Image (cartoon, rainbow, N blue to C red):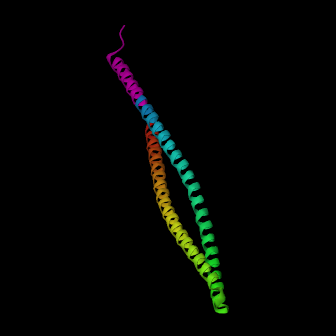
Amino acid sequence: RRPPASSMAQGAFRSHEIDFLQRQNQEILEQLAHVERERDEALSVIQGWEEKEGALQAEYDAIVAQIERTNNELEQEQQEANAKEEHTRVLSEQNRHLLELLEKEEATAKEQSERLTYLRSEVARLLEIEKDFDQVKADGEAHVNAAKNEVMRLTEELRGVRDLAE
């Protein structure tokens, strides 16, 4: 005995509906796997930028320390130059017989001045490096933030897809 036609139609409909739902489930799982791969790639990019940021921060700290040392040297040399100039003036006033010593001190002061000029140029160069570093750091942070935003967006899309699947 054959089942009624409506029962066969219902069975075919259910079978078709199950096939449809299985295909839809497979598509969702493939999309989920794709999103998870993209998330892993984004996390890898973030990790790379964080490593670069760490290296740049160490370089920046070294530059800041060098600037501080250079500034201390500059201040010390300025104090030394000022002290020597004063000493030279006093010696000049007290004794004309020490003219040779005065000339020697003036030559020393000139060397100090040249050293001071060199140190100032070094400070300017290091400040330029610091500026470049700040720009690189800002760019790196922008890339990290963009990657984090993309991960958040993908996570929200994934949640949306999961919610739709449920």
Above or below — where is 156 with respect to 17?
below
Between 152 and 70, the residue placed more toward the observer is 70
Q: In which quarter of the image is the N terminus?
A: top left
Residue at position x 58%, y 77% from top?
A: 107
The picture places residue 83, in percent across and down from the top left corner, at 65, 82
Above or below — where is 149 with respect to 44?
below
**Per the image, is 16 magenta?**
yes
Between 65 and 142, the residue placed more toward the observer is 65
Residue at position x 39%, y 27% from top?
A: 23
Q: What stretch is highlighted in magenta?
A: 1-25
Principal SS element in the magenta part? helix
Residue furthest to the bottom: 93
Q: Quadrant of residue 14?
A: top left
Above or below — where is 65 with respect to 120?
above
Residue at position x 50%, y 64% from top?
A: 125
Q: Is residue 62 left or right of residue 150?
A: right
The picture places residue 89, in percent across and down from the top left corner, at 62, 88
Residue furthest to the top: 1
Q: Let me know if residue 166 appears in the view.
A: no
